[in-house]
Image (spheres, rainbow, N blue to C red):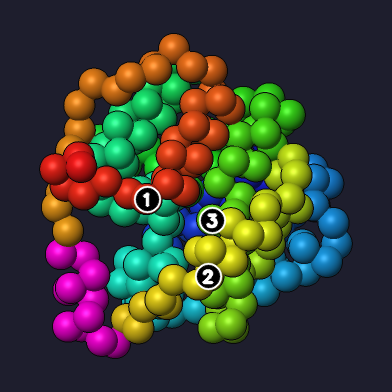
Amino acid sequence: MTKTLKVLSLLLSYPTKELQQAAPELSAAMEAEGLITAPELRALNGLIDGIGKGDLYDLQARYVFLFDRTRSLSLHLFEHVHGESRDRGKALVELGAMYEENGFNIAARELPDFLPLFLEYLSVIPLDEARDLLNEPLHIVSAIKERLRKRRSPYWAAFRALEKIAAGKPERSDVLGLLSRPDDDPDDLEALDAAWADEPVSFGPGENIGECGVDRLAMQIRAGRRPAQDATGQ
């Protein structure tokens, strides 16, 4: 297991008492593995300390405010490239199939593109393969990092670490394309309701299930860079 990826998965999950209790061990596990450099580790220690010592209810409220109520910070990767179109449903099915083919079972309550779940999967496969897979949605990771940095959120450190772990660098044009989209105001409840008032995701048998992991994920991400289909598929 790649412990650093597992730790990042935990840090980007909904804060719990168990996570708080484990906080002192998280930094030590990453330092021992040596996958990230001292500057990234120092930045992550700020996030870890805040989680470990903060009021749990405040931490949970902050998490919901950032990642649940702010669509531009959504931790569901395909949300950023497919929205709620039918293409996202197909991509989710295919990503879930990739997990299953590699013996990685997921809880029914989580969608396959949820970033903490994706990182947990990456933590249990060979590191070289994990880095290649992480490279595919890296423009999404980088865009979220920039939005969090502007908000001065300690969570930005987790996304910075992911950038350093990935096999390459994202296309700058792809990052700028995501950053050019409106950045939601979670306090504007009317706009929030309108932003989420899309057709529900459709799930069904996907095509190209036989594609290998990196190629499959790359295909799903590339498809999202094209104009999204509407709910009728036109």
Quickly name the residue at label 1: 227
Q: Type of residue at label 1?
A: Pro
Q: What residue is shown with label 3?
A: 140
- Quadrant of the rendered image containing residue 232: top left
Which mark is on residue 179? 2
Q: Is 74 on the left or on the right of 137, as rendered?
A: left
In the rendered structure, which disc, 1 or 2, sits on the residue that comes first in sequence? Answer: 2
Would you say 188 lies left or right of 118 here?
A: left
What crowding class fits label 2: few (fewer than 14 Cα within 10 Å), some (14-19), or many (20 or more)? some
Tell me what residue is drawn at x 44 percent, y 71 percent: 181
Range drawn in magenta: 187-197
Q: How many marks?
A: 3
Between 211 and 176, the one lying in front of the other is 176
Q: CA distance from mark 3 to mark 2?
A: 9 Å
Q: Quadrant of the N terminus?
A: top right
**Is 166 placed above or below 51 here?**
above
Camera-side mark, 3 or 2: 2
Q: Which mark is residue 150?
A: none
| Rendered location of residue 82, percent (x, y) | 35, 48
Residue 161 to residue 211: above or below: below
